[in-house]
């Protein structure tokens, strides 16, 4: 598991440790780790050209000391000083090692300056412009220098986090650096895992500087394959279909029959013992044509509630179900049960109209909205606000509704009151296709029926879902149906996680810049 802590928590832990260490020791620890990563990225340190982007804060000091270590190994190091002040001891150390420093001009003369020429000619750029306390996009000279770094041919290494992103939320409110590698210190920061910031961090390397014992519980977690493997239900010698879990499913309709087929398939391919499906007659026919092992019943049009299946361990309700009056009565009946319920798609819209159905519920509930659906649950909130601050809004919804929330999107976030949020590392744009959410609902529903609590089922389901998308066609475009065959493969990969994390390298694939780095490729980071 990777853990992330907020800025205030990190600063408090660093303060506790610095009080027991000689002055500057903690910064040198960070700089040593930073220099080691930078050295591995270069084909050869001796004779390479390294440019440091140095701001006023401690990140600038880290960059200066890392540059000092590289200069001692024969690199030609140039520090571009951009702040109103500079870490004097770090600058003195760099100059003593043979490095040079130049002050960046104002933005008006930057394009034709020596600074621009140095950045363009670099073999490696180290971003120490702004530290973890920065808020909002970069401005003035910092914004212009970030643009030069982003346009350069050299790989960019961010110190702690790329300048211009919000360390706590993952928001990017203006110009920001786009890094190929981010070297973060002591612990991860939430923004490194959450889009839109996560799309800018590249490969993340965490350097241990000794603050671990000072850190409390994390704000955010990001699971790895071994974490998922440890949570997944496993059948035993005495298992039967009932012990493996019976899932009730109210998905699909005569109009959206495919949603039923995909959701049921997601459950069946994820190890559920039995699916009891209820739907309109045409949907039942299509489900049985594709999945004859399902126990299916057609709803009575006059009184559908009385024909809902009983004796289930969990429910999935909503995908493709519609918003007609009987659907609301059906949702009320399902949420009135004493078993865990996953509420998705149309059912989320109905919850937005009647939030008390979830807020007053005692049994476990999992809401699985995308950003647009979450906006219906949080009146006065726009979809764009949610996409810009996913962690904040998922956590808010979990608190307001008193349940677990899985917010789907470029970064899938799982939030639950009183627990650290979780960010899924296997997400991929390949999942941006009709029906993929229906498969996810069935997948998570099977885990709920198998006995996992909502948070654990959501975390595992999101991980498996993303990995299946990557495996389905070896990275080529997929349809939701392709996920069904890939789910067993993904489960197999995860259960064999002792050989390494199958999601390893996700950040490399997400970095849009790594592919154009002939002088220092990401292969050096493996």
Image (cartoon, rainbow, N blue to C red):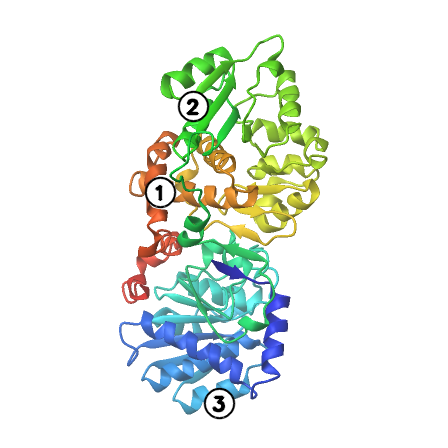
Task: Judge the density around disc 2: few (<14), some (14-19), many (≥20) Cα neighbours within 10 Å.
Answer: many
Residues 30 and 293: in front is 293
What is the x, y in percent for residue 163? Answer: 52, 65
What is the x, y in percent for residue 12? Answer: 64, 72
Q: In the displayed image of the protein, which residue is found farthest to the bottom? A: 96
Q: Secondary structure at mark 3?
A: helix
* Residue at x-position 56% and y-position 27%: 317
Q: Which residue is mark 1?
A: 490
Q: Secondary structure at mark 1?
A: helix
Task: Look at the numbered discs 1 and 3 and tell me whether their residues touch, using CB distance below 8 Å.
Answer: no
Mark 1 or 3, closer to the camera = 1
Q: Is residue 336 above or below residue 282?
A: below
Horizontally, residue 290 falls left or right of residue 167, namely left
Q: Which residue is mark 2?
A: 261
* Residue at x-position 63% and y-position 48%: 395
Q: Is residue 117 visible?
A: no
Q: In the displayed image of the protein, which residue is found farthest to the front? A: 238
In the picture, residue 33 is in which quadrant? bottom left
Horizontally, residue 340 falls left or right of residue 42, namely right
In the picture, residue 48 is in which quadrant? bottom left
Q: Is residue 174 above or below residue 467?
A: below
The CA distance from mark 2 to mark 1 is 20 Å
Q: Which mark is residue 92?
A: 3
Q: Is residue 492 visible?
A: yes
Task: Judge the density around disc 1: few (<14), some (14-19), many (≥20) Cα neighbours within 10 Å.
Answer: many
């Amino acid at each position: 598991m990777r853990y992330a802590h907020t800025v205030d928590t990190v600063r408090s832990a660093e303060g506790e440790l610095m009080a027991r260490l000689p002055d500057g020791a903690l910064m040198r620890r960070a700089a040593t780790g930073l220099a080691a990563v930078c050295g591995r990225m270069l084909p050869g340190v001796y004779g390479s050209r390294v440019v440091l982007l140095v701001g006023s804060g401690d990140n600038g000091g880290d960059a200066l000391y890392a540059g000092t270590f590289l200069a001692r190994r024969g690199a030609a190091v140039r520090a571009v000083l951009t702040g109103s002040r500079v870490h004097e001891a770090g600058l003195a150390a760099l100059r003593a090692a043979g490095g040079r420093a130049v002050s960046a001009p104002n933005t008006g003369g930057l394009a034709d300056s020596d600074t621009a020429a140095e950045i363009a000619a670099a073999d490696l750029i180290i971003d120490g412009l702004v530290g973890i306390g920065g808020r909002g996009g970069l401005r003035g000279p910092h914004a212009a220098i970030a643009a030069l770094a982003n346009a350069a041919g050299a790989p960019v290494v961010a110190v702690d986090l790329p300048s211009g992103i919000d360390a706590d939320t993952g928001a990017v409110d203006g110009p920001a650096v786009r890094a190929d590698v981010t070297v973060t210190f002591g612990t991860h920061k939430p923004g490194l895992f959450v889009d839109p910031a996560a799309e800018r961090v590249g490969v993340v390397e965490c350097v241990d500087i000794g603050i671990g014992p000072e850190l409390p519980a994390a704000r955010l977690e990001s699971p790895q394959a071994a974490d998922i493997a440890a949570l997944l239900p496993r059948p035993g010698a005495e298992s039967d279909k009932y012990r493996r879990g019976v899932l009730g499913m109210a998905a699909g309709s005569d109009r959206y029959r495919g949603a039923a087929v995909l959701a049921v398939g997601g459950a069946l391919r994820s190890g559920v013992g039995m699916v009891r499906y209820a739907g309109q007659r045409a949907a039942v026919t299509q489900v049985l044509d594709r999945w004859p092992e399902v126990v299916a019943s057609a709803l009575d049009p006059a009184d559908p509630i009385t024909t809902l299946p009983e004796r289930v361990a969990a429910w999935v309700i909503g995908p493709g179900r519609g918003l007609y009056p009987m659907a609301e009565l059906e949702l009320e009946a399902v949420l009135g049960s004493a078993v865990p319920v996953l509420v998705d798609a149309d059912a989320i819209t109905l919850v937005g109209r009647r939030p008390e159905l979830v807020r007053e519920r005692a049994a476990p509930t999992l809401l699985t909205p995308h950003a647009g659906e979450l906006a219906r649950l949080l009146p006065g909130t726009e979809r764009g606000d949610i996409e810009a601050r996913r962690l904040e809004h998922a956590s808010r919804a979990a608190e307001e509704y008193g349940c677990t929330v899985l917010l789907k999107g470029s970064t899938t976030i799982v939030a639950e009151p009183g627990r650290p949020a979780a960010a899924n590392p296997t997400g991929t744009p390949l999942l941006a296709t009709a029906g993929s959410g229906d498969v996810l609902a069935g997948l998570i529903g099977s885990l709920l029926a198998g006995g996992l609590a909502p948070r654990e089922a959501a975390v595992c389901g999101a991980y498996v879902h993303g990995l299946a998308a990557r495996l389905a066609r070896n990275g080529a475009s997929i349809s939701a149906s392709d996920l069904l065959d890939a789910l067993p493969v993904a489960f197999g990969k995860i259960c064999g996680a002792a050989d390494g994390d199958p999601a390893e390298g996700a950040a490399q694939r997400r970095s849009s810049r790594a592919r154009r780095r002939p002088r220092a490729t990401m292969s050096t980071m493996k």
